Amino acid sequence: MAGEKPRYKSYNSPAGGWGAAAATAKVLLEQSVVGKGSRALLSMNQPGGFKCPSCAFPDASCTKTLEFCENGAKALAHEATKFRVTREFFAQHKVTDLMAQSDYWLEMQGRLTEPMRYDAATDHYVPVSWDDAFALIGTHLRALGDPKQAEFYTSGRTANETAFLYSIFVREFGTNNFPDCSNMCHEPTSRGLPHSIGVGKGTVILDDFEHAEAIFLIGHNAGTNAPRMMTPLVEARKRGVPIVAVNPMPERALIKFTEPQDIVQMATFGSTEISSEFVHIAIGGDLALLKGMMKVLFEREAAGEAVLDHAFIAEHTAGYEALHDDIMAQDWAEIVAVSGVDEAQIRRCAEIYIRSSATIICYGMGITQHQEGSRLVQQIANLLMLRGNYGKPGAGISPIRGHSNVQGDRTVGIDEKPTQAYLDKVRDVFGFEPPRAEGHHSVESVAAMQAGTAKVFIGMGGNFVRAVPDTDHAYAAMRKLKLTVGIATKLNRGHLVHGQDALILPVVARSERIETAKGEQFVTIEDSMSNVTASRGVLKPASEHLLTETEIVCRMAMATLPDSKVDWARYIDDYDAIRDKIAAVYPAIYDGFSERIKNPAGFHLDIPPRRRVWATPNGKANFLILPGLHANAPVADPAMLRLATVRSHDQFNTTVYSYNDRYRGVYGDRMVLFVNAEDRADRGFEQGARVALETISDDGVARRVEGLTLLDYPMSRGAVAGYYPELNPLLPLAFYDKISGCPAAKSIPVRIVAAAD
């Protein structure tokens, strides 16, 4: 915890198991919700209950009594906490003083309880009535010279109903400025995959894991970021399915894992080996690895073996010859040098792929957060196409999304680049003409603040200023705004880095009941495999002064758009009416929404590639080329290392639950830098040395983070890793994938230097 002496000790036990059970009990005790929290956990991810407020991995059809994981329990405990942030708290603490506190300290203060307004004269937040808060928002928005001067952010925890209404409100107001949390993680999936297979989502559902004959896990850490995924992985390994893990740093859960719900394994201190093959790849070496595997396939074909699915390629794809020529032009020596993987192992991985008639490839931000993230995703799609791994059981592409409804938000309209067909439907259903010009993604919104063209920022959840790149510059940009609005359950940094006027609007949480004049309501969530399910809170709201996110959106709209064509007052109380409008705007996938959602297991949205239908301009799945072998622009500096920012095990997104990261052996510290021992020695530093990290860039801006402790860790050569968001100051705003706008946070060019005296 904060204040304890840092300790660093190797963790050699399996992930999960008794460690996860102890961590769950500990967090319930820390938040003083042992009884309430334990009861709520029995309702999480169950029919009639609420969906986990943490990751987006799907539930196992609610077949288990305890369908939650350690980090889901942490998220619930912090949401259900007994601690409260009251008006007395704000009276005791100036905002300037709160800025000096850590993110962890802010999180531990508890739930927000009533709306607050910033008072510049005293530097305190003070109580404000809901009516006055909405009036202030409406006044600021109506005073703008152009609707494009407002930025409307959405967090992935926002439910479908709220996100849909938010998108309608903002478009009736007159802009498509929708910076979104997905811009910073899986936007390359949303922007890259449609060109390949016609949809910006995965093609796999949970049942496919039961039929897969090989599973590849590239650039993600399921044991921390999507722990419920460990169950199908364990089951696959028990069936003898090979699992190939590709990462610059080994992650404990992908080595050995003990299922906390497996009574025999727990009683015998047993475990399951997860990875049958670990590929210790260089940061940014994924493109070379993928091309190396494809080169093996083409070489084997040229030698007379039938390893490609020629029928699938001929009927369903375009661009095969161009891909073949690009791959065969790559030199094996360069493939090995760039990937950091020897040729023999690349050939073993290709052999695993060839022997499997049904392969799933899962990937995370280790793929998407590069300068060529969108086109890297397309290379995974290419590899799967070569053996027809779409539209059959046990096969497909599976992005492992982050926050619980980040995919759903995009589906129902949170999109800065909406299609004209969608905008036509909005016009026809709601009777107003929506704006047609593209809006801002997250990086563009910060740039607009820096330029002074953005005046208002409204954050629907999340901690935007802590999540975006270039922390110091982002702070300065946010402080230029006329108004900032934070709609949240807990206090965070985004409420302290504020505009001239600022509001904190507290909301009902996912685990809490929603009662309206029409009775109890529920919301819906889309998981990362396109299954839509109902979520009904079971706990009493933390304060009588909270409003639901849906009511806040409706009342902002009513205060801003007095002549609106939308019946906002109706949607405050009747969530079925919202779902009927979603179905009207999206008839192809949401027809009959209100009836279909009555199924306790929910329903899957249609994903055409599962039917081998390709919604691309040419009606085909397209092989797409990324020339060369580099996913990032080369850097000439010989001292350069590539930094990947990562989350600790006691963290979800920007929320820090403790200063511990037990699977990596770190306790009581977050200012650490994981480094290969040889890279450290080459630079003349000792293990445990205190150092600084500097960004290598040509934009004339000095970026430096002090006070990092060097920890030897089995990193690939040339790679270092440290915690997000502490190292965000090193990530230049302009260092991103130009197709998607996703920051390249997994490949920041840096150098290690001596710490300042």
Image (cartoon, rainbow, N blue to C red):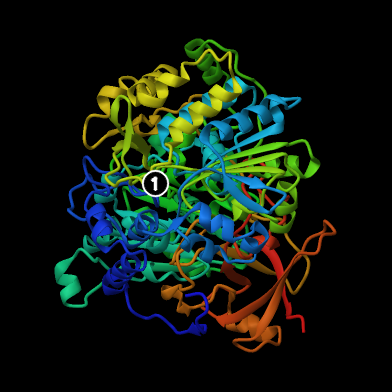
In the image, residue 632 sits, relative to residue 336, either above or below, namely above
In the image, residue 447 sits, relative to residue 249, either above or below, namely above
Q: Give residue 326's position: percent from left, percent from top.
A: 61, 47
Towards the viewer: 88 or 225: 88
Q: Residues within 10 Å of mark 1 (few under 14, many from 20)?
A: some
Q: Give residue 332's position: percent from left, percent from top.
A: 59, 62
Towards the viewer: 500 or 384: 500
Which kind of residue does numbered mark 1 sit on? Answer: Ser
One can see residue 290 in this view: no
- Residue that mark 1 sits on: 543
Towards the viewer: 236 or 136: 136
Q: Residue at x 40, y 33 (%)?
A: 609
Q: Give residue 417's position: percent from left, percent from top.
A: 60, 30
- Image quadrant holding the C terminus, namely bottom right
Determine whether the residue tagged by mark 1 lies in a helix, strand or loop: loop
Q: Residue at x 73, y 81 (%)?
A: 755
